[in-house]
Amino acid sequence: MSVSKSKLMALALASVVVSGLMHSAPAMAASQGTVGPTSSGSVSISASVPNRARISGLSDITFLNQDPTVPASGAQNVCIWSNTATKAYTITASGNGTANAFTLNNGSSTVPYSVAWASSINQTTGTTLTSGTASASLISTATNQTCASGPAASASLIVGISASDLGTMSAGSNYLGTLTLLITPQ
């Protein structure tokens, strides 16, 4: 007996789907009531959620009238929440410069800045982040998505500009940039 290639593929796909359904959900055991003065039935209830993460508590960073002979550093506490069993996450930072570089621009010149991360609060130094590269796995202490209860924050973001780069900036000119932080639950 000859079976067409398309029928074999359909049978294989159906087998995979049925196998996946049999292994992905627990068996439900609804019971039906019987006819009588009262009738009682029951249903099993199952729920699950996918991995999720959230970053909140961010503030804009401004270096105003910065002495160009002294390195600039701005640190802030932020809330990182992950719903995984281990509360683990990674962070990937990217700037809006060429090739997602961490740069500030005034329209005619560009100045680099650095980004560091610490998985605890009130830090002024941390692990240096490379644009577009995920950090090692970190653990959050947040118990609430926005740190509204439990710890008020769970990590530190540190942004800096070196004195040598500040020294290349034109006085009276605003340099702007955008830093994007991507949190991925692990």
Image: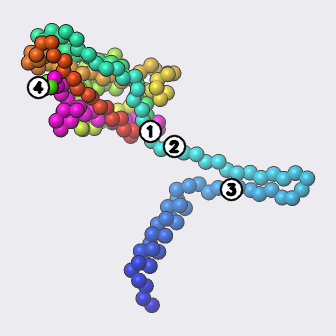
Question: Is the residue 139 above or below the residue 14 in the image?
Answer: above
Residue under label 3: 29
Q: Give the magenta range.
A: 83-106
Q: Secondary structure at mark 3?
A: loop
Looking at the rendered image, the disc whose residue lies closer to the viewer, 1 or 4, is: 4
Tell me, yes or no, whether the highlighted magenta stretch contains residue 86: yes
Circles 1, 2 touching at the beta carbon (< 8 Å): yes
10 Å crowding of disc 2: few (<14), some (14-19), many (20+): few
Q: Residue at x 18, y 25 (%)?
A: 104
Circles 3, 2 touching at the beta carbon (< 8 Å): no
**Extreme residue in the front direction:** 107
Circles 4, 3 touching at the beta carbon (< 8 Å): no
Q: Earlier in the sequence, mark 3 or mark 2?
A: 3
**Extreme residue in the right direction:** 37
- The quarter of the picture where residue 86 lies is top left
- The quarter of the picture where residue 161 lies is top left
Looking at the rendered image, the disc whose residue lies closer to the viewer, 2 or 4, is: 4
Residue under label 4: 108
Q: Residue at x 18, y 21 (%)?
A: 175
Three-letter amino acid code at the position of disc 4: Ser
Q: Secondary structure at mark 2?
A: loop
Which mark, by number, is residue 49? Answer: 2
CA distance separating discs 2 and 4: 48 Å
Circles 3, 1 touching at the beta carbon (< 8 Å): no
Residue under label 1: 52
CA distance separating discs 3 and 1: 30 Å
